[in-house]
Amino acid sequence: MKYQTQKLAYPYFVAALALFLVQVLAGVLAGTIYVFPNFLSEAVPFHIVRMIHTNALLVWLLLGYFGASYFLIPEESECEIHSPKLASLQLGIFVFAALAAVVGYLFGIHEGRELLEQPFWIKVLMVIAFLLFIYNVTMTVLKGRKTVVSIVLLLGLWGAAIFFLFAFYNPDNLALDKLYWWWVVHVWVERVWELIMAAMLAFLLIKLTGVDREVIEKWLYVIVGFSLFSGLLGTGHHYYWIGTPEYWHWIGAVFSILEVVPFFAMILWAFYLVYQSGRNHPNKAATLWSLGCPVMAFFGAGILGLMHSFPSINYYTHGTQLTAAHGHLAFYGAYVMLNLAFFTYALPALRGLQPFNQILNMWSFWFMTGAMVFMTLTLAFAGILQTHLQRVLAMGFMQIQSQIELFYWFRLGAGLCFLIGAVLFIYSALGPVREQVTISRYSQSPSQ
């Protein structure tokens, strides 16, 4: 670790992992309710559990991005973070807002809009924290060295801040509401977050492979270009059934195909660079996560998303378990694995140690990835059967649920396996180290 203010990342990573565990526990609880519908139905209804599950996911991913930025930007800019005090204040505001939202949900206090359920005052706190962060990292980049990695990261972070502002717009017209709702939900995860992903992955590949920066930056230009070009108009595949003009059918279908390109490019990029480098970096676990991230993102966000993005298919499949299959693997591959890769790389340096608990960390990779792949397959099969029974045979909803109950049991089992993997990861990242070997005993820092 080269700069003192990189230590600001550590509390962000700890807070993110704590919320990660909350999110996974809420997911397992939601899966339990699917097979035992009356489980905790009076104390914590299903819609509240799902709310906590999805909101905790978004918040801990953002905390991970914030922490990664505070670790990454000093090295890229070759200077300290502009204001450490603002970074600490931002963390306090953001964590308070997240905890207040969860407590509010448990007492039925929410706005009811899916994924944007936070009460107005909590949204305001989140924006304040985001603005403090944007100011802090922008000032740092402006006063230091400018690199493609830091500029692309800033572009993604600014986009995330700007497009979240549409969460405040809640018109009475439902079609209009959904139009702008997607400007947050889709544009975040299928456009600006892809820029954040590409920048963070580029930084990891530079550090893990030792390949010349110019080579990696050329790949980054291609990926960013396709993400910006396809992501915004690809939003059209969400506009099919909300009262928008019919031309969105064509726009949504065509640009949905192009949205797969940056994910496939990331696979080629990552594997090519690791292969070409021939460098045996000591942090093998971070390399594993960095290679697994684009692969799972390609299948989850790319292929599964594309499968039901065409109007003729989406007409039958929207709102079924196929959506859940796509959502789970897409978020896990593109963003969860990205954060876990960065944590695996940065935490040894932040704790003043060489890469540690790597075998345990890699076991957590296979537990979580295997569980998520199995869960995705079960949800995909459940969705295909549900589509046929509901949209073709016109069976009643509760009849259909009884027909696909077996798949819910499989999903619950996969969720429990994923929970084991998550606990293993947190223990490997934050728990005790068998051999307390400090970085000073080695000639090379993990962050070099």
Image: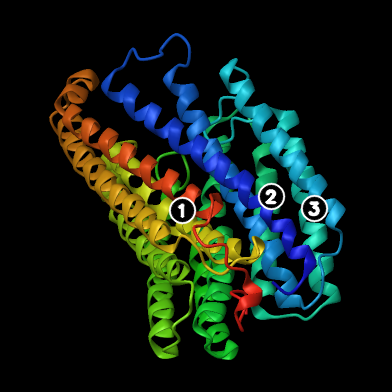
Q: Indicate left or right for 390 with 300 as reference.
A: left
* Distance between the alpha carbons at the discs numbered 1 and 3: 37 Å
Of the two numbered discs 3 and 2 in the rendering, the one whose residue sits closer to the viewer? 2
Marking on residue 87: 3
Q: Give the residue displayed 38% in from the left and 32% down from the top.
A: 28
Of the two numbered discs 1 and 3 in the rendering, the one whose residue sits closer to the viewer? 3
Split into 4 quadrants, where in the image is the N terminus? bottom right
| Residue 78 image offset from top left, x and y in percent | 77, 78
In the image, 154 versus 344, the foreground residue is 344
Of helix, strand and loop, which one carries label 3?
Answer: helix
Q: Amino acid at mark 3?
A: Ala
Q: Which residue is mark 2?
A: 11
| Residue 349 image offset from top left, x and y in percent | 63, 67
Q: Indicate left or right for 151 with 174 as reference.
A: right
Q: Give the residue displayed 40% in from the left and 40% down from the top.
A: 241
Q: Which residue is mark 1?
A: 236
